[in-house]
């Protein structure tokens, strides 16, 4: 046997044996139950991670094969009922996971870098997360289709008029939690596994973690305050307290994580920074993903703590007879304050986000010196828009802040969630466009004056030397 064929056999043996280990690990993890989500579904401890790592280390074709086998192994767990569910719930989704490492590591690098762990660590964390998200979306779509057919009876019992909406919420709730755990474990692995000196992954990860923390705190404190004091017309004091809570969080986070990530903690702000050329396209998506995960985590912890303490969520509905929450509000946004008018909700969110983001762009513009008071100004701007907006929509001006509570609250909170995604993003984009338009001439003048000052300063020195 030639040396080349022997080497090839060893590589194939390595792929197969490593695949067996990854399959076993993934299957064991998939059978461990961390916790049940309020909407249903069980969260497992990153059971898909071994599949993704294998796909990155050995290529998309091998990843495809092992993911397909893993989907069939789920039959042993007793989860699946019919071949149709096998196909929709697992086979499509897990097979997509086989491609999670696609393009994360170049083909040439797979042959140059020795060792599966080294190849995994040498891949782009951003690309792995991106393809993982795509795979989770594919599985979610398959699960939704399956749920519409097989779980229609449960929708009415859960208070949903549409089996489609119920299936979207039911499957989305635990898959998002699963994805959040996967992201955390991926980040931990990247920090633990050694890398080359040229690797800047850790710096990128630090920015994303900062955005996660900031959005988590924003939802936990801001929405938690609304849940505690209430924000209805009968309790006007709750408006001010909630507005102050959101604003003060921004102040605290601006001076803590602002030096790491810029403290966007808001997809609308990140979009404005992207349009202004202050944020890369890759970082924009990274920021948005971790902002949403932070918001979901903040809302999840609030729901758990309020349930554990037996505390009433003042933004939800409390059942006096059963002595428990009939439905959670979690400080979610809604259109009750505008009589369910979608147009009114969109307008108020666009205008308030425009005001808020315009203030951010102005006070953080490096071309015009505003001292070290940016965080305070931004926090007060958020208080300002909340004082008016709470009575209309609960004030979103932040898609992540709306998505987190809505997903866990479910029901009516999800009905018009799109308004609190589209409105703030449109307002943020409009603010970026207007700010660039109204400051263009001033920015050019500032540059010219700075150049003139430099020439003037250099002039006397040249004359003296002469």
Image: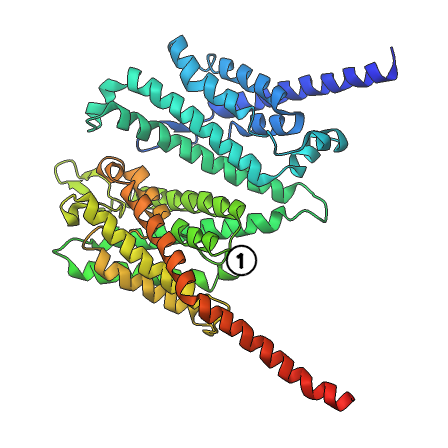
360 or 310, nearer to the observer: 360
What residue do we see at 38% from left, 22% from top?
Answer: 143
What residue do we see at 45% from left, 69% from top?
Answer: 441
- Is the image coloured rainbow, by chain, by secondary structure, or in one colour? rainbow
Other residues around mark 1 within 10 Å, as few (<14) / some (14–19) / many (≥20): some
Give above or below for 441 relative to 89. below
**What is the x, y in percent for residue 142?**
39, 21
**What is the x, y in percent for residue 166?**
27, 27
Q: Quadrant of the C terminus?
A: bottom right
**What is the x, y in percent for residue 234?**
11, 56
Report whether residue 335 is seen. yes
Tell which residue pokes out farthest to the right in this image: 2
Asked whether, in this view, residue 131 is left or right of residue 341, the answer is right
**What is the x, y in percent for residue 253?**
43, 60
Give above or below for 286 relative to 378. above
Q: Quadrant of the N terminus?
A: top right
Tell which residue pokes out farthest to the bottom in this image: 464
Tell which residue pokes out farthest to the top in this image: 83
366 or 121, nearer to the observer: 366
98 or 159, nearer to the observer: 98
Disc 1 target residue: 260
339 or 290, nearer to the observer: 339
Give above or below for 284 relative to 448. above
Asked whether, in this view, residue 383 is left or right of residue 435, the answer is left
What residue do we see at 51% from left, 46% from top?
Answer: 281
């Amino acid at each position: 046997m030639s040396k080349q064929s022997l080497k090839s056999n060893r590589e194939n043996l390595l792929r197969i044996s490593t695949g067996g280990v990854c399959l076993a690990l993934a299957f064991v993890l998939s059978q461990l139950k961390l916790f049940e989500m309020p909407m249903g579904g069980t969260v497992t401890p990153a059971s898909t991670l071994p599949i993704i790592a294998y796909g990155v280390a050995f290529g998309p074709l091998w990843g495809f094969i092992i993911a397909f086998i893993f989907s069939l192994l789920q039959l042993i767990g007793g989860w699946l009922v019919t071949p149709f569910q096998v196909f929709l719930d697992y086979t499509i989704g897990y097979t997509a996971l086989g491609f999670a490492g696609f393009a994360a590591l170049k083909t040439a690098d797979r042959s140059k870098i020795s060792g599966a762990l080294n190849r995994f660590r040498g891949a782009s964390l951003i690309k792995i997360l991106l393809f993982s998200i795509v795979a989770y979306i594919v599985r979610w779509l398959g699960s939704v289709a399956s749920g519409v057919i097989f779980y229609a009876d449960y929708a009415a019992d859960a208070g949903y008029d549409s089996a489609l909406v119920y299936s979207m919420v039911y499957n989305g709730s635990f898959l998002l939690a699963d994805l959040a755990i996967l992201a955390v474990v991926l980040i931990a692995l990247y920090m633990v596994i050694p890398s080359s000196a040229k690797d800047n992954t850790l710096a990128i990860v630090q920015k994303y973690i900062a955005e996660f923390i900031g959005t988590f705190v924003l939802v936990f404190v801001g929405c938690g305050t609304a849940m505690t004091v209430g924000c209805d017309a009968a309790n006007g004091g709750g408006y001010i307290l909630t507005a102050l809570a959101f604003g003060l969080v921004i102040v605290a986070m601006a001076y803590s994580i602002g030096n790491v990530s810029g403290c966007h903690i808001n997809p609308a702000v990140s979009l404005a920074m992207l349009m202004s050329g202050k944020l890369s396209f890759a970082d924009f998506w990274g920021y948005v993903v971790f902002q949403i995960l932070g918001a979901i985590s903040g809302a999840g912890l609030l729901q758990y703590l309020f349930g554990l303490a037996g505390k009433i969520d003042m933004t939800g509905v409390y059942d006096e007879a059963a002595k428990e929450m009939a439905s959670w509000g979690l400080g979610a946004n809604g259109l009750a304050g505008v009589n369910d008018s979608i147009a009114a909700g969109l307008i108020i969110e666009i205008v308030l986000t425009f005001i808020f983001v315009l203030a951010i762009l102005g006070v953080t513009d490096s071309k015009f010196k505003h001292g070290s008071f940016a965080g305070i100004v931004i926090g007060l701007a958020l208080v300002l828009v909340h004082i008016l907006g709470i009575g209309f929509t609960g004030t979103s001006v932040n898609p992540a802040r709306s998505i987190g509570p809505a997903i866990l609250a479910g029901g009516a909170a999800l009905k018009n969630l799109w308004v609190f995604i589209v409105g703030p993003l449109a307002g943020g984009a409009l603010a970026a466009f207007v700010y660039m338009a109204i400051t263009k001439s001033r920015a050019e003048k500032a540059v010219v004056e700075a150049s003139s000052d430099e020439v003037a300063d250099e002039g006397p020195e040249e004359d003296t030397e002469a």
